[in-house]
Amino acid sequence: MLVVTFFSAILALLICLFADSLALILAPGLSKVDRNILAQYIKRLSFLLVNISVSNICIGILNAEKNFLIAKSIGIIQSFCIILVCFGLAEKIGIDAIYLGFSVYFILENIFLLVHVFKRVGFHPMNPLRDQEIRRLLTLSVPLFLSNAIIQINAMVDKAIASRLDAESV
């Protein structure tokens, strides 16, 4: 988990460094002002990659232990955080309330999942590859990570193409 978290942090930093270029690739049809806004959101949201990676690893471990209820119940945390923050802060901070809601959600989700992983599995995060089952889980998850990456790239290409279309051209 520590290795994946480290790589996620490096990836988030790279995304921040190249956010302007990514905004141009993702939405070449946007105006300069709109691309700058998109780049700002890319920078803000890129750090959530670390939380997402930890969350997915914890969910994978809990699912491998046949403990599905905890992983499925995190949607309650998501809904609660986003709705509460949006209702409470939307008038004061506008659209940034959604970003804040997701940030609070991912932090609470990771705490919730990590507590359950440590409690149920006895997993030690400093040397996860010591466990044969964790190595097996990582090996089995490689195709899943690749397919998700391809789906995300496909979605980015679709959005880049769609951003060049005129309004009502579809």
Image: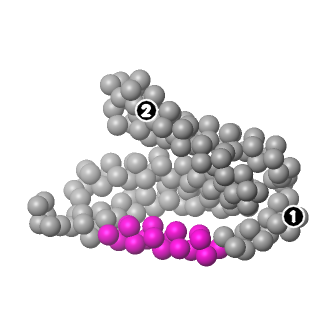
Q: Position of residue 7 (x, y in %)?
A: 66, 62
Looking at the picture, does residue 32 appear above or below residue 151? above
- Whether pointer 2 and pointer 1 mark residues with C-beta atoms closer than 8 Å, the reply is no
Magenta: predominant secondary structure element? helix
Q: Nearer the viewer, residue 105 or 93?
A: 105
Neighbor class of circle 1 (other Cα within 10 Å; few <14, some 14-19, many 20+) is few
47 left or right of 128 in image: left
Q: Position of residue 51 (x, y in %)?
A: 61, 49
Q: Which residue lies under the disc numbered 2?
A: 83
**Does residue 118 belong to the magenta stretch?**
no
Q: Which residue lies under the disc numbered 1?
A: 131
Q: Quadrant of the N terminus?
A: bottom right
2 or 1: tag closer to the N-terminus = 2
Q: Position of residue 44 (x, y in %)?
A: 47, 46
Q: Which residues are magenta?
A: 142-158
Which residue corresponds to the image point at 45% horizontal and 29% vertical from the top-left? Answer: 85
Which residue corresponds to the image point at 45% horizontal and 70% vertical from the top-left? Answer: 151
Q: Nearer the viewer, residue 60 or 126?
A: 60
Q: Quadrant of residue 12?
A: bottom right
Q: Position of residue 34 (x, y in %)?
A: 26, 51
- Say if residue 9 shows up in the picture: no
Coloration of the structure image: one colour
Identify the secondary structure beneath mark 2: helix
The type of residue carrying mark 1 is Asp
Alpha carbons under labels 2 and 1: distance apart: 39 Å
Which residue corresponds to the image point at 41% horizontal and 23% vertical from the top-left? Answer: 88
Extreme right residue here?
Answer: 130
156 left or right of 108 in image: left
Q: Quadrant of residue 136?
A: bottom right
